[in-house]
Image (spheres, rainbow, N blue to C red):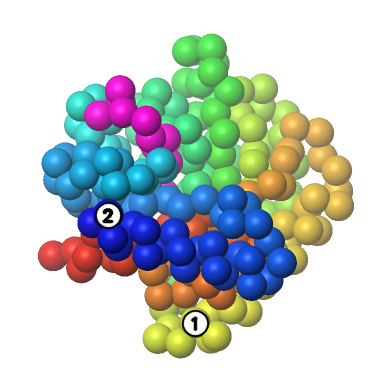
Amino acid sequence: MKKRMERVKERIAKAAEGCGRSADSVRLVAVSKTMPMEVVREAIDAGATVLGENYIQEAREKFNALASLPAAWHFIGHLQSNKAKYAVRMFDLIHSVDSLKLATALDRYAEKIDRVQPILIQVNVAREDSKSGIYPEDTLALVKSIASLKNILVRGLMTIPPYFNAPEEVRPFFAALRELRERIKDEAIANIHMDELSMGMTGDFEAAIEEGATLVRIGTAIFGERH
């Protein structure tokens, strides 16, 4: 796994430097969902500093066992409001907030543990029925609504684009998210920071980096095919 991890990091650095960015402007989220505990531990030993999980129950078991190891935990799956109380106790960043209801639940539970919870807004750029996320034209209004929540900090945007075999076909969706981020940033809304763009996976992360990704969510290239 160490060689795969190093190879992915080399590709990230090459893509960033190729478009005039520093290698450390892009962080690797190693998507550890469905991977057993010992494999996740091996990934941390191999250099994973951020782990991406999709399911609260599975993540709780891993977090409780591995929380002492030097890695941040990000939630990248669909989050239900009734799981918000668990999410705020575990995750350094939640990538997938797409409603005021969910943000309000996270705010309420974060306040109870005296925490400000960083989040990203998940945008359904392609308007796919099969995917979560708010539509681009509704994003600014949602961000403005969330801005008043004292225990939530919006750090940027996330998207899961349609699947294509060719990265160039995905590029317009990455560009659209970047442009949306810039429009929201121009609004200069208090308590809103548009620093992060979470986009790009194993098959297309170089294109995502070229379009401004700061977080790339990579599983297969590190862990191999999931069964």
x and y percentages locating residue 9 in the rendered image: 44, 59
Residue corresponding to mark 2: 2
- Disc 1 marks a residue whose amino acid type is Pro
x and y percentages locating residue 85 in the rendered image: 39, 25
Circle 2: is it few (<14), some (14-19), or many (20+) Cα within 10 Å? some
x and y percentages locating residue 118 in the rendered image: 57, 34
**Residue 143, located in which quarter of the rendered image?**
top right
Q: Residue at x 40, y 86 (%)?
A: 165
Distance from disc 1 to disc 2, alpha carbons, whole Å, reads 25 Å
Q: Nearer the viewer, residue 168 or 157?
A: 168
Question: Of label 1 and label 2, which has the lower sequence position?
Answer: 2
**Residue 134, located in which quarter of the rendered image?**
bottom right
Q: In the structure shown, which secondary structural element does the residue marked by tag 1 occupy?
A: helix
Q: Residue at x 49, y 82 (%)?
A: 167
Q: Residue at x 47, y 21 (%)?
A: 109
Q: In the structure shown, which secondary structural element does the residue marked by tag 2 occupy?
A: helix
- Work out whether 167 lies above or below 91: below
Q: Is residue 8 magenta?
A: no
Principal SS element in the magenta part?
loop
Q: Nearer the viewer, residue 37 or 2?
A: 2
Q: Which mark is residue 167?
A: 1
Q: Residue at x 55, y 28 (%)?
A: 117
The magenta-colored residue range is 66-79
Residue 208 as seen in the image, left or right of residue 22: left
* Numbered disc in front, either 1 or 2: 2
x and y percentages locating residue 62 in the rendered image: 22, 34
Q: Nearer the viewer, residue 39 or 60?
A: 39
- Work out whether 4 lies above or below 118: below
